[in-house]
Image (cartoon, rainbow, N blue to C red):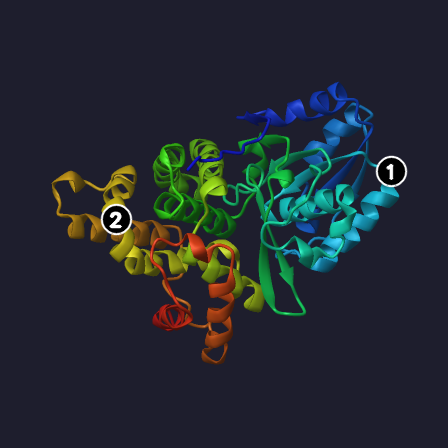
Amino acid sequence: MANRIVLNTISYHGHGAIENIVPELKTRGYQKAFVCSDPDLIKFGVTKKVTDLLDAANFAYEIYSDIKPNPTIENVQSGVASFKASGADCIVTIGGGSSMDTAKAIGIIVNNPEFADVRSLEGVAPTKKHAVFTIAVPTTAGTAAEVTINYVITDVEKKRKFVCVDTNDIPEIAVVDPDMMSSMPKGLTAATGMDALTHAIEGYITKGHCAISDMFHLEAIRLISQHLRGAVQNTPEGREGMALGQYIAGMGFSNVGLGIVHSMAHGLSALYDTPHGVACAIILPTGLEYNKRAAGERYRAIGKAMGVEDIDAMTDEAAADATIAAVKKLSEDVGIPANLHGILKEEDVNFLSESAFADACRPGNPQDTSVEEIQALYRSLM
């Protein structure tokens, strides 16, 4: 079977990368940008780092900020109407996964109006046209939405998140500038960083993994393990390492899928508004324990990339346990809770388990599962 790899046409990395935004827009002849960014980034002046460049170049733009941390169907619908009314011909999205996911859905629907019902985009939608030309500028080091063919929307009415997978949604240009991430608070840095680690680890053990994705994921695990603690302390080296590591993780998992850690985390975010990265970080060690039966032989390479000492001399069982312990230690060091106590309610376990089983990430899990087994995993974390 052939393996498909989809990546940005162009990506920029490193300090000052945002200086390339205006030249890229002008070279292509665009006239007005629809700037998608969330209210907090506007409030704290992060978005302004990019809009100042647009202002200096007299490049027209309109800001859209009706975006929630877990973007909703309504956010997307409102965005589509605003884009059409703005007269914009391109999108610049600035933010974490919420801003970028909203922008992806807007861009897809504008160019594929037959999918105006946002729910119709769930799963692998057969869109025909690429989304509106988009430059994605991440402000968190975690989601890698700037390089993925996925986006996640919350259905408030049904209290669930749904995953959309579409090669037409990937931004043409990613601008990964660690200076755009320097104002992230410690908690958000930790949560998004552990999300990135979850991407890399789940992507490495997923059923669809291949030689190319393995290369991306192991390097991402190495970079994240080496730099996340520093990023939480806001060191320049930590920020730069995490900016690169999370992007490389996205290069991999976007093309091969994830597993039940993400499918279980999606429900928690939809129902309780739990930060996605926190949910992933809490569930990840339990997911690794569960998946040892099917993928335990791959844990040694993960542990080695994380810097576990003497792992080559260990038995497979010991190497797997040492790897899981390293994941727990990193999570603990950056302040992530150890369980779902105070978050998960017993009366919601059945609903969450059914949602997780139906989630688009679940089929990629290396260990075949069931609603009942997912129920047991949730309860073990209470």
Disc with the residue nearer the chain's start (1 vs 2):
1
Residue placed at 46% from the left, 47% from the top?
257
Quadrant of res 301 = top left
Residue 355 vertical position relative to residue 113 in the rendered view, above or below: below
For label 1, the crowd category at 10 Å Cα-Cα, with few meaning under 14, some 14 to 19 and many 20 or more, is: some
Q: Residue lying furthest bottom in this view?
A: 347
For label 2, the crowd category at 10 Å Cα-Cα, with few meaning under 14, some 14 to 19 and many 20 or more, is: many
Q: Secondary structure at mark 2?
A: helix
Q: Nearer the viewer, residue 318 or 328?
A: 318
Residue 111 picture location, percent across and down: 76, 41
Residue 154 picture location, percent across and down: 63, 60
Q: Nearer the viewer, residue 213 or 93?
A: 213
Q: Amino acid at mark 2?
A: Thr
Q: Nearer the viewer, residue 263 or 276?
A: 263
Q: Amino acid at mark 1?
A: Gly
Residue 309 picture location, percent across and down: 19, 40
Q: Secondary structure at mark 1?
A: loop
Q: Residue lying furthest front in this view?
A: 1
Residue placed at 79% from the left, 29% from the top?
55
The disc label shown at residue 323, or none: 2
Residue placed at 40% from the left, 43% from the top?
200
Q: Is residue 343 visible?
A: no
Which residue is labeled 1 in the image? 87
Q: CA distance from mark 1 to mark 2?
A: 52 Å
Quarter holding the N terminus is top left
The disc label shown at residue 317, or none: none
Q: Are marks 1 and 2 in contact (CB under 8 Å)?
A: no
